[in-house]
């Protein structure tokens, strides 16, 4: 992909899918996502939430890379391409505030 086209894709992801908001205002939106993740885990996965609480393992300790890299930080590059393709072509993002998950 040419550099200019790659930059346009980055801009689209940052603005259209809200990734830019995670980096603004001292990462306040990111902190909000951690809180939402904790609450969803408490509601949907209470045993795991309890286990993490016993270990004093907070969401920011394991989920930062997930949110800031669109969940691509730990996958092989070929899988990352598929994730980004799905993001740009098929997936409709919903705000976690609406309690809808991708």
Image: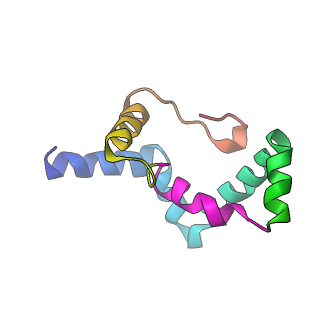
Q: Is residue 29 magenta?
A: no
Image-based side of 3 in relation to 28, left or right: left
User: Which one is nearer the viewer's eye here, 16 or 56?
Assistant: 56
* Residue extent of the magenta highlight: 56-71
- Can I make out residue 42 in this image? no
Q: Is residue 92 left or right of residue 47?
A: left
Q: Residue at image x 61%, y 58%?
A: 63
- Horizontal arrangement in the rendering, residue 33 relative to residue 20 (left or right): right
Which residue is more in the foreground, 83 or 20?
83
- In the rendering, at what x and y percent does residue 64 appear? 57, 62
Where residue 76 appears, x then y in whole percent? Answer: 37, 47
Q: Quadrant of the C terminus?
A: top right
> In percent of the image, x 42 and y 48: which residue is there?
75
- Dividing the picture into quadrants, the one containing residue 59 is bottom right
Prevalent SS, magenta region: helix
Q: Nearer the viewer, residue 10 or 40?
A: 40
Q: Position of residue 48 (x, y in %)?
A: 79, 49
- In this rendering, the answer to whether 45 lies above or below 52 is above
């Amino acid at each position: 992909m040419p550099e200019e086209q790659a930059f346009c894709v980055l801009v689209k992801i940052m603005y259209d899918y809200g990734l830019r908001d995670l980096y603004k205002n001292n990462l306040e939106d990111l902190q909000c996502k951690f809180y939402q993740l904790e609450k969803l885990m408490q509601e949907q996965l209470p045993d795991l939430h309890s286990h993490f609480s016993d270990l004093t393992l907070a969401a920011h300790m394991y989920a930062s890379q997930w949110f800031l890299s669109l969940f691509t930080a730990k996958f092989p590059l070929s899988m990352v391409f598929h994730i980004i393709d799905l993001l740009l072509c098929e997936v409709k993002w919903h705000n976690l505030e609406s309690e809808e998950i991708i």
